[in-house]
Image (cartoon, coloured by chain):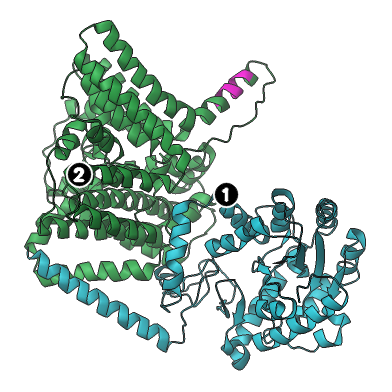
Chain colours: A cyan, B green
């Protein structure tokens, strides 16, 4: 056995293989970007432990994640919010965690995507399970996991092929996802259309929508199909129990000087139609604000916020999101609803 | 810390750098290895390192006393102290919740309305492995089978040596401690072979267990539905592959890493799915545990020296406790009982029917053994008896209208991988990776090695924990 020769040849082949794979991925349009995983969320969550009443936290689902741009918020107020919004989920378990397990008493902006926000408060429901897993991970993460994350950040920022995601996008290029796509059949009669990744994040979890979502209408249409699928298969909304949870939590949070603002972010097309039919504004949004006695900002009430057409009906294109955030913050500052250090 | 994580790669590079630097003498290198092993463990949960320290101190003191003392009563007391501390840790941390749960059931059955608070006890990683390893030391001292370690450093390193600390192989003091007496340095060949074994182990764990098989097995065993026969078999077969690749992968990594340091660890797996019968299986699967159970439980219980009935009782007790060692649940005990039963039936059949094993009937008997192993895996993997019974019912045609939850790809994938695994075990049953590596051309070996490395990187594993860490 000529082990030295074997090893160095294997090493050369390995390097050649990985370089070729990286080149192929770049050619296919993949970019080097961070994964929006448990670890990066936990790092943001840990910031709450040392934050003051001047600070701002963003909760919500992907709309809050896409539509609120941290640089623009910081430019207007001098405060960089902490982004804890989780895609495809309700903000409630995270809000409960902040209220019950921290001393934070700053401003919490809660994005309300009605279909997700008014979902059954049961851990098995995916929109509750996702944020709960993140909260649990924050408390249970080991030092080894923290170090893994630290090492993975520069690697993910360097190599396009490192793009596996907890979302399990239909175009992920980790080995498991590629094997999954090798053969499709109708044994299970699965009808969910393929769901492709359409964004990336930075180290603060600030989201940028991929250009192809804006420029390629066929690509945007694939995402619209997914929203339609989710809409058709959505469970019935749960209103009173959710509002009651917020009543209790808000009483507790406000009593220690905390400030909460609800935010209804833009949607359009089939998504908006579905929301208007299934979760009408007066019966859900208005009732939430009234019963919790909490300020809320609905995009329909402000001309500057109601001028956008999200490319895939649910999230603003990043250039629009930047203007939207600037306008939104101006409105909030004008109402003295959020702190301003400038 | 997990072998299949980025932090471990950095950790290993630093340890190897320090180990092979010229700034340390041998004692300093051993101290560095010991401290590194504590860091390796503490990066998971720092406070639980105290248990390791207590176990190390108690067994060091007890071992020395047992070897030196002649007063039999005092010697028994020292042995008892070691057993109480080690088994006490196991009883509290691993079996505390299970014992309380069963006690509660019994109290309620007896008519008492007893509902205690459920304790939230963390299971220290690898506790079953290191307690068994230290216990073997004190028991060996009691029987004066081996001399005590020459220094506390050597003993502490034996208990804590990071490659095998959390999931074995469970090493005997006579196998490891003498290796610490003289300076150890891997030759280039040994170092590279260790690197290959580390690659192979990681490939087994990350690619085969986590990427290829885990989702199928998780889907089937996580389903609350009554399943179709094909789905039930696919999930069970997938688990049989997953647990083999996961655990053998860990052992291969451990052996490889130790070899990179110039330390030799014993084999823990020898192509177990090619076993012909269950006696053969337990000489091939988790060898270090089965040897431990044989030497410290089965033989002291009487082994096969006290008649056939006593042999069967010893076998059954050993396997029941072996099952319980794996986890605090009755399903694990039942898994152990099944294996006890398999061993008893096999022993009975062997004494009454003589078969000359050749390649053909050997293959069929191996397949039969593997089928029975799969039946036992259902109890090992299922969360409770009802789930296990549901899956077994589906496997044996009792639920003809069961639901389909796996795609055709899942099923084809499992058939190809498990078929290949079984055949590989069969053809490798009397040889080793090293022998095969010697026979094939070097360039083919290079390609094989490079493919494993590339797939490991493309897999982008999310550092899934090894299954055996929970035991």
The residue located at (36%, 49%) in the rendering is B243
User: Vertically, is A232 above or below A72?
Assistant: above
The residue located at (52%, 48%) in the rendering is B399
Mark 2, residue position: B267
How far separated are the C-alphas under marks 1 and 2?
38 Å
Q: Which SS type dominates the magenta stretch?
A: helix
Residue B297 is left or right of residue A37, and the answer is left
From the top left corner, tell me how far across and down residue B83 is, in percent: 35, 21
The residue located at (60%, 63%) in the rendering is A44
Which chain contains the residue that carries disc 1? B
Residue B368 visible in the snapshot = no
- Residue B106 is a magenta residue: yes
Mark 1, residue position: B224
Q: Circle 1 — which element? A: loop
Q: Earlier in the sequence, mark 1 or mark 2?
A: 1
Residues rendered magenta in the picture: B102-107
């Amino acid at each position: 056995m000529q082990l030295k020769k074997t090893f160095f040849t294997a090493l050369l082949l390995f390097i050649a293989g990985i370089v070729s794979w990286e080149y192929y991925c770049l050619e296919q349009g993949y970019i080097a970007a961070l994964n929006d995983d448990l670890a990066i969320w936990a790092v943001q969550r840990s910031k709450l432990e040392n934050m003051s009443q001047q600070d701002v936290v963003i909760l919500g689902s992907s709309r809050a994640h896409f539509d609120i741009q941290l640089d623009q918020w910081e430019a207007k107020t001098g405060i960089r919010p902490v982004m804890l919004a989780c895609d495809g989920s309700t903000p409630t378990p995270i809000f409960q965690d902040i209220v019950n397990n921290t001393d934070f008493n700053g401003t919490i902006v809660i994005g309300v995507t009605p279909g997700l926000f008014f979902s059954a408060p049961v851990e098995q429901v995916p929109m509750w399970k996702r944020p709960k897993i993140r909260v649990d991970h924050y408390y249970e993460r080991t030092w080894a996991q923290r170090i893994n994350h630290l090492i993975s950040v520069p690697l993910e920022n360097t190599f396009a092929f490192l793009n596996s995601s907890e979302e399990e996008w239909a175009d992920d290029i980790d080995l498991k996802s590629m094997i999954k796509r090798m053969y499709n059949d109708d044994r299970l009669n699965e009808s969910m259309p393929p769901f492709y990744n359409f964004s990336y994040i930075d180290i603060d979890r600030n989201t940028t929508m991929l250009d192809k979502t804006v420029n390629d209408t066929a690509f945007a249409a694939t995402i619209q199909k997914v929203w339609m699928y989710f809409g058709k298969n959505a469970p019935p909304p749960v209103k009173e129990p959710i509002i009651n949870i917020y009543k209790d939590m808000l009483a507790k949070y406000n009593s220690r000087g905390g400030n909460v603002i609800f935010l209804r972010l833009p949607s359009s097309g089939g998504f908006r139609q579905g929301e208007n039919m299934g979760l009408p504004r007066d019966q859900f949004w208005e009732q939430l604000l009234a019963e919790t006695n909490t300020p809320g900002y609905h995009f329909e009430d402000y001309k500057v916020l109601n001028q956008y057409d999200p490319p895939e009906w649910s999230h603003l294109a990043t250039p629009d999101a930047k203007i939207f955030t600037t306008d939104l913050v101006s409105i909030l500052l004008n109402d003295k609803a959020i702190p301003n250090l400038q | 810390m997990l072998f299949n994580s980025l932090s471990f790669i950095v950790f290993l590079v630093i340890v190897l750098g320090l180990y092979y630097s010229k700034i340390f003498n041998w004692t300093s290198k051993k101290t560095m290895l010991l401290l590194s092993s504590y860091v390796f463990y503490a990066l998971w949960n720092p406070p639980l390192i105290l248990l390791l320290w207590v176990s190390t101190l108690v067994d060091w003191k007890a071992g020395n006393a047992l070897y030196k003392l002649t007063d039999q009563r005092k010697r028994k007391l020292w042995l008892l102290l070691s057993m109480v501390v080690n088994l006490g840790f196991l009883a509290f941390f691993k079996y505390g919740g299970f014992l309380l749960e069963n006690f509660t059931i019994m109290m309620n059955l007896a008519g008492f309305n007893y509902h205690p608070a459920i304790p939230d006890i963390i299971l220290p990683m690898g506790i079953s492995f290191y307690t068994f390893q230290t216990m073997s030391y004190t028991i060996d001292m009691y029987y004066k089978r081996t001399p005590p370690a020459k220094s506390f450093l050597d003993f502490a390193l034996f208990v804590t040596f990071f490659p095998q600390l959390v999931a074995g192989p469970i090493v005997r003091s006579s196998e490891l401690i003498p290796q610490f007496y003289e300076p150890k340095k891997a030759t280039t060949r040994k170092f590279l072979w260790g690197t290959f074994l580390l690659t192979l182990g990681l490939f087994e764990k990350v690619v085969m267990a986590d990427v290829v098989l885990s989702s199928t097995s998780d889907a089937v065993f996580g389903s609350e539905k009554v399943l179709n026969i094909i789905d039930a078999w696919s999930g069970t077969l997938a688990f049989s592959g997953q647990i083999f690749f996961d655990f053998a992968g860990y052992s291969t990594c451990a052996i490889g890493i130790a070899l990179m340091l110039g330390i030799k660890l014993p084999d823990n797996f020898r192509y177990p799915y090619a076993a012909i019968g269950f006696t053969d299986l337990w000489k091939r699967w988790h060898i270090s545990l089965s040897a431990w159970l044989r030497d410290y439980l089965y033989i002291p219980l009487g082994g096969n020296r006290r008649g056939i009935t006593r042999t069967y009782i010893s076998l059954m007790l050993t396997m029941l406790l072996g099952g319980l060692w794996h986890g605090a649940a009755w399903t694990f005990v039942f898994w152990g009982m099944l294996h006890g039963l398999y061993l008893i039936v096999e022993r009975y059949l062997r004494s009454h029917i003589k078969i000359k094993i050749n390649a053909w009937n050997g293959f069929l008997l191996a397949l039969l053994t593997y089928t029975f192993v799969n039946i036992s895996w259902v109890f090992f993997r299922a969360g409770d008896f009802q789930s296990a019974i549901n899956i077994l019912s589906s496997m044996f045609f009792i639920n003809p209208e069961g639901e389909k939850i796996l795609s055709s790809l899942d099923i084809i994938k499992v058939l190809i991988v498990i078929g290949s695994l079984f055949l590989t075990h069969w053809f490798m049953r009397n040889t080793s990776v090293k022998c095969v590596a010697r026979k094939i051309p070097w360039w083919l070996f290079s390609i094989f090695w490079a493919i494993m490395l590339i797939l490991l990187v493309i897999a982008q594993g999310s550092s899934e924990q090894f299954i055996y860490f929970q035991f």
